[in-house]
Image (cartoon, helix red, strand yellow):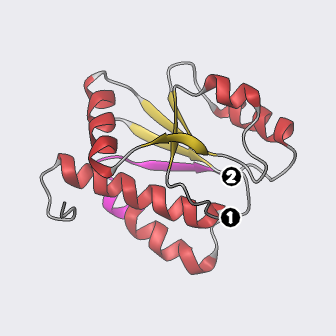
């Protein structure tokens, strides 16, 4: 079973979003378990060191950045399916820091995506990506959650 590591420099989940994030984590726990790494916010270079230290050589790394490629929910489902078929052990998703991701992090990413052309605060981006992972697995499992 593939696991997901979400790396998001910043504080712990905001109390107003913690329950919502937790609900999607619970729904995903048997299909796509999530682990969080929340490095202390700092300058780009310090954040980059913490991020790169957490990554394994065989991780498939997705950087979320406002300048990344667009993807829709079925596209994310296809990506997850492809990674599972390739027996990827861990999908690492990095939410870029407040000042963006350092060049070393960008270079390590296998794929750079954007959640939207809009920019979201980190806490909201955490909720959105967690919900989208659940939506993608629902699509793959033939569930009724996604109505497109």
Residue 19 seen in render = yes
Does the CB distance between marks 2 and 1 fall below 8 Å?
yes
Q: Which sits earlier in the primary sequence, circle 2 or circle 1?
A: 1
In this picture, is 59 found above or below 31? above
Q: Residue furthest bottom?
A: 16
Coordinates of residue 77 in the picture (x, y in percent): 28, 43
Q: Quadrant of the C terminus?
A: bottom left
Q: Quadrant of the N terminus?
A: top left
Quadrant of res 82 = top left
Q: Closer to the camera, 121 or 12? A: 121
Residue located beneath label 2 in the image: 38
Image mark for residue 143 = none
At 73% from the left and 63% from the top, the residue drawn is 11
Q: Closer to the camera, 10 or 3? A: 10
Q: Secondary structure at mark 1?
A: loop
Residue 41 in the magenta stretch? The answer is no
Residue located beneath label 1 in the image: 12
Coordinates of residue 108 in the picture (x, y in percent): 63, 24
> Horizontally, is 3 left or right of 45 in the view?
left
- The number of numbered discs placed on residues in the rendered structure image is 2
Q: How far is mark 2 from mark 1, CA to CA?
A: 7 Å
Coordinates of residue 48 in the picture (x, y in percent): 77, 35
Q: Closer to the camera, 109 or 119? A: 119
Q: Closer to the camera, 2 or 70? A: 70
Quadrant of res 67 = top right
At 33% from the left and 56% from the top, the residue drawn is 134
């Amino acid at each position: 079973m593939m696991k997901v590591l979400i790396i998001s420099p910043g504080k712990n989940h905001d109390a107003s979003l913690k329950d919502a994030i937790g609900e999607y984590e619970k729904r995903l726990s048997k299909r796509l378990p999530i682990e969080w790494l929340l490095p202390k916010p700092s300058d780009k270079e310090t954040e980059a060191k913490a991020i790169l230290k957490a990554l394994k050589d065989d991780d498939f790394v997705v950087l979320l950045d406002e300048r990344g490629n667009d993807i829709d929910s079925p596209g994310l489902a296809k990506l997850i399916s492809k990674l599972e078929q390739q027996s990827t052990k861990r999908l690492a998703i990095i939410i870029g820091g407040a000042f963006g991701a350092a060049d070393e992090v960008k270079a390590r990413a296998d794929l750079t995506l954007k959640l939207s052309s809009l920019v979201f605060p980190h806490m909201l981006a955490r909720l959105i990506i967690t919900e989208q992972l659940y939506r993608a697995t629902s699509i793959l499992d033939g569930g009724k959650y996604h109505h497109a």
